[in-house]
Image (cartoon, grey):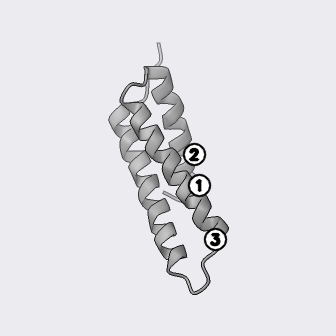
Amino acid sequence: MSEHANPLAVQRTAQDVINAYAKQLMEERSAPRPDTERVEWLKAELAVCGADLQALDDADPDEVDEIAARYAARAQALGQ
């Protein structure tokens, strides 16, 4: 029997990703010439992250594992 991801640890990782995206969004918006496509992409990613955090509340262990894998990959891509 394999262990499942801890939902609280997944929430922390997701929050770290959210914080990184929010920081990037603020930086992009304050740039002399903001990249509107990047701004929209970051806003969309933040919306997805918010939905995933809500989904964790009622997620079964396999769903928590799927969300954990997504955020582990995102955190790694962000260098966290």
Cα gap from disc 2 to disc 1, whole angstroms: 6 Å
Q: Tell me how far mark 1 sits from mark 3, CA to CA.
A: 21 Å
Label number found at residue 16: none
Q: Residues within 10 Å of mark 1 (few under 14, many from 20)?
A: few
Instruction: Classify mark 2: helix, strand or loop.
Output: helix
Q: Observer-nearest residue: 62 or 28?
A: 28
Q: Amino acid at mark 2?
A: Ala
Q: Residue at x 63, y 71 (%)?
A: 36
Per the image, the residue denoted by label 2 is 73
Question: What residue occupies the far top of the structure in this picture?
Answer: 1
Q: Amino acid at mark 1?
A: Ala
Residue located at (64% from left, 74% from top): 35
The percent coordinates of residue 26 (x first, y second) are 46, 72
Q: Please tell me which residue lies in front, 18 or 50.
A: 50
61 over 31 or under it: above or below: above
Secondary structure of the residue carrying tag 1 is helix
**Which residue is at 42% across, 25% downward?**
59
Amino acid type indicated by mark 3: Thr
Q: Which residue is mark 3?
A: 36
Q: Left or right: where does residue 78 sit relative to residue 6?
A: right
**Disc 2, disc 1: CB below 8 Å?**
yes
User: Would you identify the image quadrant in which residue 3 lies?
Assistant: top left
Residue 29 rendering spot, x and y as whole percentages: 52, 75
Among all residues in the image, which is located at the extreme bottom? Answer: 32
Residue 73 pos. (x, y %): 57, 45
Crowd tier of the residue under label 3, counting other residues whose Cα lies within 10 Å: few below 14, some 14–19, many 20 or above: few
Q: Residues within 10 Å of mark 2 (few under 14, many from 20)?
A: few
Q: Position of residue 53 (x, y in %)?
A: 41, 40
Number of the label disc, if any, that sits on residue 77: 1
